[in-house]
C-alpha cells in the first residue's frame, strides 16, 4: 500500500473533514494521521473500492470519538455542529437543542453518531449517507427515527 | 436549492463520480458562484496542507505512529495483572498495612512537588513513574531511543513523545546551543488536558547546525497551563546566568519540569 500516494490523493479531503469537525489545525492533522494509521493496520479488512467514502467515514468516526472523549463544551467546531443541528427545522421540532449532542455522543452506537452528523450536519441525503455507511436507505431511516425518539425522550427528561 | 455535501464536492474533485453525476455537478458549479468558491477554497487548502505537511514526510510520520502505538499496546499487555500478580499484590498490601499500623507517618508529600525522583533537588524530574518526555532518533532503519546526554548531530530527525500523560496539560519547547528557543507543543492551540497515557507530538524535528546541545523541556501540570506565560518565563530565564535554576524559580512549584539534553557532535 503506497501511503504517500494515498495521502497525496485523499489527504486533503481527510484533513478538511477533520478540520471541519474539530476546528483546530493541529488536532485535524493529528487525526488525519490516525485515519491513515487505521487504514494501514486494517488494510486486509478494509474494502478500498470506494476510498473517499471509506476514508470520510473513518475520519468522521475518529473525530467524533475525539470530541466525545474530551467532552468538550460547545464551542468552536462543536458550536457550529450545535448550531447546524439546532437550526435544522426537522430536528428542532423533535428534540431539544441542548440534549441532542448528549444523545449523539453518549447514548447511541458509534455508527449512529456518524449517520446523524452526515445527515443533520453535512446535510447529506439518506441515499448519500447510505452509500458512505454501506447500509440500506431504510436502515439509515430506521436509525435516524430511533435517534429522534431517544432525543425526544431524553429532552423530556432534562427540560 | 439542495445543498451539495462536502463529500460530493470532494468526489467531484477526485473524479470519483459517475459520468452522469459529474456532468450534472459540473454544470451546477459553473452556474453557482457559491459552489465555485467552495471548490477554490478546497484547492487552496490542499496546497496549504502539502506545504505544511509534505507527502514525502507523511509515510514516515504514520509509520512512527504505528510503531509507538504497538509499543504502547505491548507495554499495556505486559502490565496486565494475572491471578499470580493479584496474589502478590494482596501480600504486599497486607505487609504495607502492617507497616502503617506499626510505623507512625512521617508526613505527606504532594506528588507534584516530590523530590525523590528529581535530580538532586533541582526540581527537574527524571524518567520514572510520573509524566516524562522521551526522544527518539528516526531514520530509515526505524527509531532509536535517546537517553539524556546522548550525542546527536545536525540533520538527525527527532521524534518527541510523552509517557504517563493522562490528566496533565503540557508545553514542550527546546533551547539550542545558540540560545534559540523553539516552541514545539502546542503550537496552534491552547494546552489541553490529555486523556491518553501516551502522547506523540504530531511532527518530528530535524536538528539544525546549532552547536553544543539541544535541550528539550516538558512543563506539565494537572491544571490547564498558560502556554504564553511559560514561554515568556523561559525567555526571561534565558537572560539569567543559570537558565534551569531561574526557570524553576519562576514557575509554580506545582508545575513539573522534565528535560532531555542532547549533546551535539562537532561537524
Image: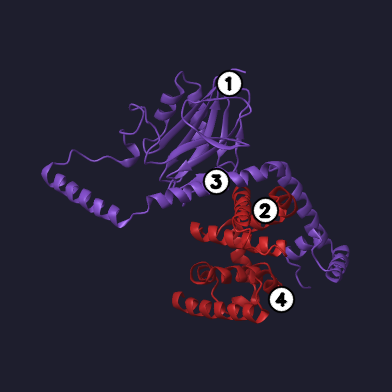
For residue B117, what is the image quadrant? top left
Name the chain letter of the residue that bears numbered label 1.
B
Residue A51 image point, x, y percent: 71, 61
- Residue for badge 3: B67
- Residue for badge 4: A127
Height in image: B97 above or below A105? above
Quarter holding the C terminus of chain B?
top right
Mark 3 vs mark 2: same chain?
no
Q: Give me the disc on residue A30.
A: none
- Residue for badge 1: B178
| Chain letter tied to purple | B
Mark 4 vs mark 1: same chain?
no
Q: How many other residues sit within 10 Å of disc 4, few (<14), some (14-19) or many (≥20)? A: some
Mark 4 and mark 2 lie on one chain; the one further toward the N terminus is 2
Residue at disc 1, secondary structure: loop
| Chain letter tied to red | A
For residue A129, what is the image quadrant? bottom right
Spatial CA distance of label 4 from label 2 is 24 Å
Amino acid at each position: 500500500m503506497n501511503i504517500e500516494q494515498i495521502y497525496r490523493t485523499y489527504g486533503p479531503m481527510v484533513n478538511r473533514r477533520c478540520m471541519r469537525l474539530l476546528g483546530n489545525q493541529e488536532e485535524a492533522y493529528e487525526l488525519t494521521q490516525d485515519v491513515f494509521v487505521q487504514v494501514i493496520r486494517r488494510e486486509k479488512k478494509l474494502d478500498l473500492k470506494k476510498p473517499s467514502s471509506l476514508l470520510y467515514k473513518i475520519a468522521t468516526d475518529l473525530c467524533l470519538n475525539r470530541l466525545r472523549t474530551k467532552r468538550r463544551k460547545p464551542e468552536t467546531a462543536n458550536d457550529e455542529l450545535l448550531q447546524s443541528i439546532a437550526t435544522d427545522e426537522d430536528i428542532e421540532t423533535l428534540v431539544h437543542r441542548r440534549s441532542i449532542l448528549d444523545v449523539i455522543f453518549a447514548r447511541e452506537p458509534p455508527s449512529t453518531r456518524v449517520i446523524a452528523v452526515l445527515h443533520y450536519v453535512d446535510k447529506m441525503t439518506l441515499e448519500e449517507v447510505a452509500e458512505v455507511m454501506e447500509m440500506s436507505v431504510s436502515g439509515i431511516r430506521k436509525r435516524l427515527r430511533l435517534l429522534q425518539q431517544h432525543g425526544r425522550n431524553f429532552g423530556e427528561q432534562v427540560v | 436549492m439542495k445543498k451539495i455535501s462536502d463529500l460530493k464536492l470532494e468526489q467531484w474533485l477526485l473524479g470519483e463520480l459517475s459520468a452522469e453525476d459529474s456532468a450534472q455537478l459540473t454544470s451546477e458549479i459553473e452556474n453557482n458562484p457559491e459552489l465555485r468558491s467552495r471548490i477554490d477554497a478546497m484547492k487552496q487548502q490542499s496546497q496549504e496542507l502539502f506545504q505544511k505537511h509534505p507527502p514525502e514526510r507523511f509515510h514516515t510520520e504514520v509509520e512512527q505512529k504505528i510503531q509507538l502505538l504497538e509499543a504502547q499496546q505491548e507495554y499495556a499487555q505486559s502490565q496486565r495483572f494475572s491471578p499470580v500478580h493479584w496474589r502478590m499484590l494482596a501480600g504486599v498490601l497486607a505487609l504495607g498495612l502492617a507497616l502503617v499500623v506499626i510505623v507512625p507517618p512521617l508526613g505527606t508529600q504532594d506528588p507534584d512537588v516530590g523530590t525523590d525522583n528529581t535530580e538532586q533537588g533541582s526540581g527537574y524530574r527524571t524518567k520514572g513513574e510520573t509524566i516524562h518526555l522521551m526522544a527518539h532518533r528516526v531514520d530509515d532503519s526505524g527509531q532509536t531511543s535517546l537517553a539524556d546526554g546522548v550525542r546527536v548531530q545536525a540533520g538527525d530527525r527527532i521524534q518527541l513523545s510523552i509517557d504517563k500523560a493522562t490528566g496533565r496539560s503540557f508545553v514542550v519547547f527546546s533551547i539550542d546551543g545558540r540560545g534559540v528557543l523553539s516552541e514545539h507543543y502546542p503550537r496552534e492551540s491552547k494546552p489541553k488536558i490529555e486523556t491518553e497515557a501516551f502522547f506523540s507530538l504530531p511532527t518530528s524535528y530535524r536538528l539544525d547546525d546549532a552547536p553544543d546541545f539541544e535541550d528539550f523541556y516538558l512543563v506539565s501540570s494537572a491544571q490547564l497551563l498558560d502556554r504564553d506565560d511559560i514561554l515568556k518565563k523561559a525567555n526571561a530565564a534565558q537572560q539569567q546566568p543559570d537558565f534551569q535554576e531561574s526557570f524553576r524559580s519562576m514557575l509554580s512549584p506545582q508545575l513539573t519540569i522534565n528535560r532531555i539534553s542532547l549533546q551535539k557532535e562537532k561537524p
